[in-house]
Image (spheres, coloured by chain):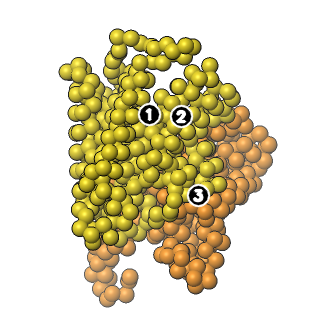
Chain colours: A yellow, B orange
């Protein structure tokens, strides 16, 4: 029973980690709390859906959605976030307000274009569940584990082993000094958006497959939950985000199984967050304060 | 027809009050508050529970609701001292969600059924939209006068200096923590008062009335109007609460695209006019000042 719950929470937690990864990459380099990432997640789920039902190719759906949503991210950075950040800021939450506006627009745009109703991927493996001893694992979960692992490895390789990743890390450390050293910080920021929005899109498709339904309200819960997760992970720390995502998944599954919660499951992330922040104001893995 | 007008005006007036209250925390003290609706809700539920369950007098309940909300605001103010801007923004979003969840699950707040509130009487006559509108109007005037006074006082200047640069303010010997907490107390208390008025006017409250989207709505009013001014939040709140109602008469088309327009406006505003429609750097304000000067024939006395 307990082992089963651990497996369940790992599946949910890795999905959370993937969902929040995009926002982490963007915060890491631009210092924006990008709620609009949940919009990318939503749009990704819908683009993936249309590609999948018209071609029947899941791989194509993932690649197409990640690529197109990633490009949307770059366009948004060029047209909205970049100019806002370039101005002297009168208030730290101005970019966040822009992100909220973009997110509202994305949900409403999807509702108007695709209808308010539920759509189903109806994706199924030949085998529904795998049994290992007393533990049953859904094959879709295995897909999620595998994809999360692959994407995280890709991310790690890109950030740590490529020249682009070096530029990204330098820019995250200090954009001005990186620029002075000849790093193309603009392309590092574009990389953040391609990866960030692409990851969000992948997470959206996976959620669609896991729960077999997508609606225009799909992004609502992730929009704030991903913020809680990236803060727990120390804002802009990819590894911290993975740990925080798994932690929140674990806390949700365990608390809703073993206790009678006075609040809905989705609020657990924030209770954990508020407690952690009161004890350690820079998050679980925050090393320094970025202002 | 006039009943409808008063109903809309009463709602708009509550939002004006909320926008003014948020402006104290975000505009003057510069703190990233994203959960103002939570405090609106705390005030509403506190006042409603006091009159309904404990049969406290309406006016006393309003005051007590306001004080209790201010107390909660003081706790958030204490928390805010420990957190950087971005962390505070997310924490306040979190507080909003947790509060809504609590409203929706605690038996004292009526859980998911919400809470019915009897409308109070004033000199033997039950208060309707009209009376509540005038009550809110009076409160708005008092709050505006207080804000004007506050901005000219030592407290207001201290807040302005903290908003500009907290470290520099601290180095000049300004007690940053005290003023910051005070700003939270005042801002949330006014929101709590607005909540008490709202609960008794509506006669029914539910947790969804205080959702995160309402916080965003309030924030939009402040940002679109012009943050850090008095006219900005007032005009922003009027614009965003009256315009959708006015447009409803034009066609259903508009109401269908409401959120889209809302979000779009928000993005366009912070992108091209972060000072707001009616902020000091806005072309609208400058233009009308220019016209005003031309008409009156006076020189550049007005600023």
Chain bearing tag 1 is A
Which residue is tagged 1? A15
- Label 2 lies in what chain? A
> What residue is shown at x 41% (from left), y 18% (from top)?
A139
Asked whether disc 1 touches disc 2, contact meaning CB atoms under 8 Å apart, the reply is yes
Distance Cα–Cα, label 1 vs label 2: 9 Å
The local crowd at label 1, few if under 14, some if 14 to 19, many if 20 or more residues have their Cα within 10 Å, is many
Question: Residue B69 has which mark?
Answer: none
- Indicate the quadrant containing the N terminus of chain A: top left, top right, bottom left or bottom right: top right
Q: Position of residue B63 (x, y in %)?
A: 71, 57
Left/right of residue B230 with respect to residue A70 in the rendered view = right
Cα–Cα span, label 3 and label 2: 22 Å
Closer to the camera, A95 or B257? A95
Mark 2 is surrounded, within 10 Å at the Cα level, by few (under 14), some (14 to 19) or many (20 or more) other residues, namely many
Q: Are marks 1 and 2 on the same chain?
A: yes
- Marks 3,2: beta carbons within 8 A: no
Q: Are labels 1 and 3 assigned to the same chain? A: yes
Q: Earlier in the sequence, mark 1 or mark 2?
A: 1
Q: Nearer the viewer, residue A104 or A28?
A: A28
Residue depicted at 68% across the width and 55% down the height: B72
| Mark 3 vs 2, N-terminal side | 2
Between A118 and A150, the one lying in front of the other is A150
In the figure, residue B110 lies in which quadrant?
Answer: top right
Residue B133 drawn above or below residue B145: above
Q: Residues within 10 Å of mark 3 (few under 14, many from 20)?
A: many
In the image, taking residue B143 as reference, residue A35 lies left or right, namely: left
Q: Is residue A173 left or right of residue B114?
A: left
Q: Report which residue position mark 2 lands on.
A: A249
- Report x, y in % for residue B225: 40, 62
């Amino acid at each position: 029973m307990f082992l089963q719950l651990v497996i369940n929470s790992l599946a949910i937690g890795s999905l959370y980690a993937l969902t929040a990864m995009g926002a982490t990459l963007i915060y890491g380099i631009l210092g924006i709390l990008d709620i609009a990432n949940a919009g990318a997640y939503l749009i990704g789920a819908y683009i993936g859906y249309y590609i999948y039902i018209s071609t029947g190719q899941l791989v194509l759906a993932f690649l197409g959605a990640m690529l197109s949503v990633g490009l949307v991210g770059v366009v948004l950075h060029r047209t909205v976030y970049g100019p806002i950040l370039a101005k002297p800021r009168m208030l730290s939450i101005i970019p966040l307000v822009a992100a909220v506006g973009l997110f509202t627009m994305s949900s409403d745009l999807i509702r108007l274009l695709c209808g308010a109703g539920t759509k189903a991927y109806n994706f199924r493996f030949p085998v529904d569940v795998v049994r290992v001893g007393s533990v049953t694992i859904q094959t879709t979960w295995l897909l999620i584990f595998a994809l999360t692992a692959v994407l995280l490895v890709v991310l790690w390789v890109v950030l740590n082993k490529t020249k682009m990743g070096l530029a990204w890390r330098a820019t995250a450390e200090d954009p001005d000094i990186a620029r002075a050293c000849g790093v193309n910080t603009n392309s590092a920021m574009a990389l953040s958006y391609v990866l960030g929005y692409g990851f969000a899109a992948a997470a959206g498709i996976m959620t669609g497959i896991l729960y077999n339904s997508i609606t225009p309200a799909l992004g609502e819960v992730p929009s704030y939950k991903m913020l809680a997760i990236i803060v727990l992970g120390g804002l802009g720390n990819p590894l911290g985000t993975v740990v925080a995502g798994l932690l929140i998944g674990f806390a949700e599954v365990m608390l809703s199984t073993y206790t009678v919660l006075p609040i809905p499951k989705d609020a657990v992330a924030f209770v954990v967050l508020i407690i952690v922040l009161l004890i350690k104001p820079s998050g679980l893995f925050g090393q320094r304060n970025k202002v | 027809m006039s009943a409808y007008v008063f109903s809309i005006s009463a709602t708009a007036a509550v939002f004006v009050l909320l926008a003014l209250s948020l402006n104290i925390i975000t505009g003057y003290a510069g703190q990233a508050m994203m959960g103002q609706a939570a405090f609106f809700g705390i005030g509403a539920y506190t006042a409603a529970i006091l009159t309904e369950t404990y049969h406290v007098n309406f006016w006393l309940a309003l005051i007590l609701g306001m004080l209790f909300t201010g107390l909660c605001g003081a706790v958030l103010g204490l928390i805010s001292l420990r957190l950087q801007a971005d962390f505070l923004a997310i924490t306040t979003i979190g507080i909003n969600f947790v509060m809504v969840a609590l409203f929706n699950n605690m038996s004292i707040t009526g859980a998911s059924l919400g809470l019915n509130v009897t409308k109070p009487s004033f000199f033997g006559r039950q208060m309707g939209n009209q009376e509540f509108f005038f009550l809110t109007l009076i409160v708005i005037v008092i709050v505006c006068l207080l804000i004007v006074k506050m901005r000219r006082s030592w407290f207001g200047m201290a807040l302005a200096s903290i908003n500009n640069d907290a470290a520099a303010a601290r180095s000049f010997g300004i007690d940053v923590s005290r003023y910051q907490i005070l700003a939270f107390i005042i801002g949330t208390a006014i929101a709590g008062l607005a909540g008490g008025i709202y609960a008794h006017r509506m006669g029914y409250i539910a947790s969804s009335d205080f959702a995160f989207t309402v916080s965003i709505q309030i924030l939009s009013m402040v940002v679109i109007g012009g943050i850090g001014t008095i006219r900005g939040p007032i005009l922003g709140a009027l614009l965003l609460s009256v315009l959708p109602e006015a447009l409803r008469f034009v066609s259903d088309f508009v109401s269908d695209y409401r959120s889209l327009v809302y979000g779009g406006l928000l993005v366009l505003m912070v992108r091209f006019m972060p000072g707001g429609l009616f902020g000091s750097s806005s072309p609208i304000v400058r233009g009308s000042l220019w016209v005003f000067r031309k008409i009156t024939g006076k020189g550049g006395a007005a600023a």
